[in-house]
Image (cartoon, rainbow, N blue to C red):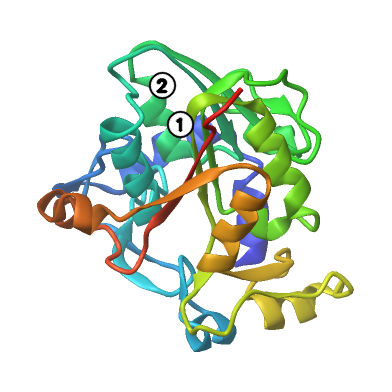
Amino acid sequence: MEHIRQVTTMIPQPMRFGLRKILFYGDTARCVLCGNAVRKFAPHGGGADVLERRRVVGGMRRDDDRCPVCHATDRTRMMMRYLQTHAGVGSRPVRLLHVAPDFGLYLWLRRQHAIDYVATDLDAARYRHIDGIRAADLTRLPFGDMSFDIIVCSHVLEHIPDDYAAFREMHRVLAPGGHALLLTPFARDGMGTDEDPSIAEPAERDRRFGQWDHVRIYDRDDFMARMRSVGFATELYEPYADDAEMAEALHLNREEALPVGRRTQA
């Protein structure tokens, strides 16, 4: 499987995207992110003992979840919904920073009105298909203070050893009144955040944190406390509490909620 993945990543993403549109075309379902009609959505997540044992939301298996064309999942649709209904995307001009941009949300954002869109990743070469992608370290962002109205950072911070530096930088570049959508996998077993910066072996990281390049498993309350420690005012977007009918229609995860950081002062 890894050999196949290495080969397919050599194919430009627009070409892979076009091939997937043909291969998975159907009339059973339609992805709200990329707009493609497909036969069915695919399973997503699971496969690591620690993720099941610690009840890690965002890591456990979800059936009928992932778009086979753009690879958007329930968490991507949840962020889309928040951006529509709470952050004004599509209804007002916004400056948006997309960290490690997932393709489905990128496609949706590109269709929205009046977005000044900037994408960034430490390894920008992985995102050649994203217009204007900029190479940047999330702990040392090359942007001025208060540069963005919205930051989207999904499933990134669990990879970063110095996550406090990343939190501080995102708070610095967020404009007053702005929205920082910061999502990671969260353990729901009540045992707190598990991290150990001394662990460097990929196999041990995989065993301990559920993926070879993760450096921790967060507890959600601790994650939000870390956000507040750098100055964010925090809130938790719970889509089923906000609009249960729409959340069900989007096939969102009932156990998942979205931490949002707000900057209240200049």
Question: At which x and y percent is residue 31?
Answer: 26, 43
Identify the residue position indicated by label 2 in the image.
Answer: 110
Say if 32 sits above or below 51 in the image: above
Say if 23 sits above or below 206 in the image: above
Q: Is residue 156 visible?
A: no
Q: Identify the residue at image location x=52%, y=67%.
A: 221
Q: Find the distance from the CA under tag 1 to the CA under tag 2.
A: 6 Å
Identify the residue position indicated by label 1 in the image.
Answer: 106
Say if 215 sits above or below 54 in the image: above
Q: Identify the residue at image location x=26%, y=53%.
A: 239
Position of 103 compared to 223: left or right?
A: left
What's the residue type where badge 2 is placed?
Arg
Asked which secondary structure carries label 2, the reply is helix
Rendering quarter of residue 18: top left
Total marks in image: 2
Question: At which x and y percent is residue 156?
Answer: 63, 51
Question: At which x and y percent is residue 30?
Answer: 20, 43
Rendering quarter of residue 9: top right
Task: Please tell me which residue lies in front, 190 or 139.
Answer: 190
Residue positioned most to the front: 265
Query: In the rendered image, which quarter contains the N terminus?
Result: bottom right
Query: In the rendered image, which quarter contains the C terminus?
Result: top right
Q: Identify the residue at image location x=68%, y=30%.
A: 172
Q: Mark 1 Cα within 10 Å, few/some/many (few <14, many 20+)?
A: some
Question: At which x and y percent is residue 138?
Answer: 73, 39
Q: Identify the residue at image location x=78%, y=41%.
A: 139
Q: Is residue 179 visible?
A: yes
Position of 170 compared to 31: left or right?
A: right
Q: Mark 2 Cα within 10 Å, few/some/many (few <14, many 20+)?
A: few
Q: Do the numbered discs 1 and 2 sit on residues whose CB atoms are within 8 Å?
A: yes
Position of 7 compared to 22: left or right?
A: right
